[in-house]
């Protein structure tokens, strides 16, 4: 997530990159996301806070920072939990009215096809259809996925994956990845027969989708879960980083509560399966919004166990982390730095906040892969890197993007985005002739 505003680093090219024209930030539940919500649907952020039994964004933040979410959020039953989650989507998609301001005696009615958007009246429904029909089908998938996502929290998703039997370079798409999973159909059938999926459909207040639709949703959520470790693995492959002769350290820069809130020690184990015989892989989450949960241990000073993935975290701006730990040998120098939607293109303030980090990564010549939500974000990010004279080695649509559609909550009739949909690889500066042995990465 976005790093906060900090004084700019001492550097010869500390000139501010220009603000990307029309840059937006609308997909986050951080303060910026909350502001964007209210500009689309006045009062929506309050509804969300209310549903979560929170008084303010600060309270939400502090609950998110705490470890005992269940207690803070205080749901009494499954149906109440699903209801409250759904209520945060309940506003008229045409006139933006919230249920509280709908005419007396009228309740919000949901589009029957997608089970996702709401209308205060049949007039609004009719007026909105020409626009909504373009997104109704995609929004149906999004509505199923946001329920099925619960199975990640219950532990049903993901299934236990198989070790990679093919070389990384031969796994080019999600279809390839699913094809190396032994007994895939059986594994998905087990999830479908699980206890929690039953609880889900008897409490969520929506009709249960067809089995085929559910299977597809489970697969999309599986890609959503594994997109992050696979992003790291493919960046390692692209930069020919060798985990077999020595341990590897990966820093996840700008990590936020999105990556760290519900993280489990095993969440990046897929990386060890990608590189059987590795000498130990450490993934360090760094960012001011890192949640110090139970698995967020300090970065290693000695090497971690061979053949395994060790997760750690540090709550600070990246360049502060670097000065405090890396420079004092209290954390390893990274072999690779990855940023999941850092969003440094999003505004002037953010660009300034990211500047010390970007310059540090550039000047230490560190292999980096950053991801974006869209082609447009990629374009703006490339402009910024160009202004900083950073050497871009590859960019484009990312083959291991999450397949789960991410709707803009406050404005559903917009093309949904997906996590890690685009990527860019960079290392060093355009004027340095840093020789880089690039591996393959399909665009
Ligand atoms: Zn309306
Ligand atoms: Zn619809």
Image (cartoon, grey):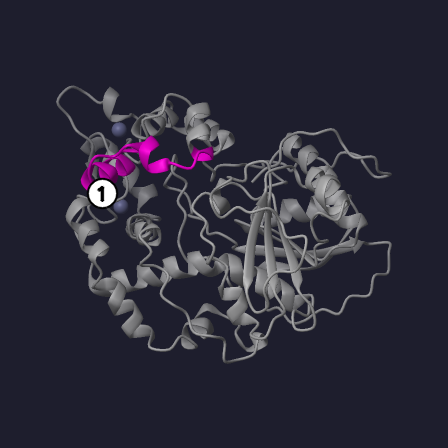
Image quarter hosting the N terminus: top right
Count of all numbered marks drawn on residues in the image? 1
153 vs 11, nearest the viewer: 153
Q: Residue at x 33, y 56 (%)?
A: 155
Q: Percent from the top left, x then y, of residue 27?
A: 47, 40
Looking at the image, residue 27 lies above or below residue 38: below
For the question of whether residue 231 can be seen, the reply is yes
Q: Is residue 392 left or right of residue 259?
A: right
In the structure shown, which secondary structural element does the residue marked by tag 1 occupy? Answer: loop
Q: Residue at x 22, y 29 (%)?
A: 120
On whether residue 317 falls in the magenta region, the answer is: no
Q: Percent from the top left, x then y, of residue 15?
A: 80, 34
Q: Residue at x 68, y 49 (%)?
A: 382
Q: Is mark 1 within 8 Å of ligand 2?
A: yes
On whether residue 85 falls in the magenta region, the answer is: yes
Q: Which residue is mark 1?
A: 111
Outermost residue on the left side: it is: 105
Tell me the magenta residue range. 64-88
């Amino acid at each position: 997530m976005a790093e906060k505003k900090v004084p700019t680093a001492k550097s010869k090219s500390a000139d501010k990159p220009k603000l990307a024209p029309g840059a937006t930030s609308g997909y986050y539940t951080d303060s910026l996301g909350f502001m964007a919500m209210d500009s689309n649907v006045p009062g929506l952020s309050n509804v969300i806070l209310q549903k979560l039994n929170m008084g303010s964004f600060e309270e939400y933040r502090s609950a998110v920072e705490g470890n005992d979410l269940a207690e803070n959020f205080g749901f009494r039953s499954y149906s109440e939990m699903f209801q409250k989650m759904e209520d945060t989507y309940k506003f008229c998609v045409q006139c933006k009215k919230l249920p509280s301001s709908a005419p007396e005696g009228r309740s919000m009615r949901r589009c029957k096809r997608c089970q996702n958007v709401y209308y205060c009246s049949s007039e609004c429904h009719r007026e909105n259809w020409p626009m909504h029909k373009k997104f109704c089908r995609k929004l149906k998938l999004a509505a199923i996925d946001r329920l099925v996502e619960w199975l990640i929290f219950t532990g049903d998703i993901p299934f236990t994956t198989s070790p990679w039997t093919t070389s990384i370079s031969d796994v080019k798409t999600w279809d390839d990845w699913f094809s190396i999973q032994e007994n895939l159909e059986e594994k998905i059938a087990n999830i479908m027969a699980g206890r929690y999926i039953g609880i889900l459909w008897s409490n969520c207040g929506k009709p249960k989708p067809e089995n085929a639709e559910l299977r597809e949703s489970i697969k999309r959520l599986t890609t959503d879960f594994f997109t992050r470790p696979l992003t790291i693995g493919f960046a390692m492959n692209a930069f020919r980083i060798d985990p077999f002769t020595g341990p590897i350290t990966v820093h996840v820069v700008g990590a936020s509560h999105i990556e760290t809130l519900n993280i489990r020690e095993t969440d990046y184990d897929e990386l060890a399966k990608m590189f059987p015989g590795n000498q130990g892989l450490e993934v360090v989450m760094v960012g001011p919004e890192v949640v110090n949960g139970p698995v967020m241990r300090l970065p290693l000073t000695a090497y971690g166990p061979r053949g395994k993935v060790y997760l750690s975290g540090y709550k600070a701006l990246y360049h502060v982390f670097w000065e405090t730990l890396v420079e004092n040998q209290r954390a390893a120098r990274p072999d690779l730095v990855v940023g999941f939607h850092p969003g440094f293109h999003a505004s002037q303030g953010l660009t300034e906040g990211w500047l010390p980090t970007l310059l540090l990564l550039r000047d230490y010549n560190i292999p980096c892969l950053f991801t974006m939500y869209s082609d447009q974000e990629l374009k703006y990010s490339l402009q910024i890197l160009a202004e900083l004279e950073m050497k871009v080695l590859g960019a484009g649509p990312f083959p291991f993007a999450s397949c789960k559609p991410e709707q803009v909550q406050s404005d559903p009739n917009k093309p949904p985005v997906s996590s890690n949909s685009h990527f860019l690889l960079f290392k060093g500066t355009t004027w340095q002739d840093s020789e880089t042995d690039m591996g393959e990465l399909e665009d």
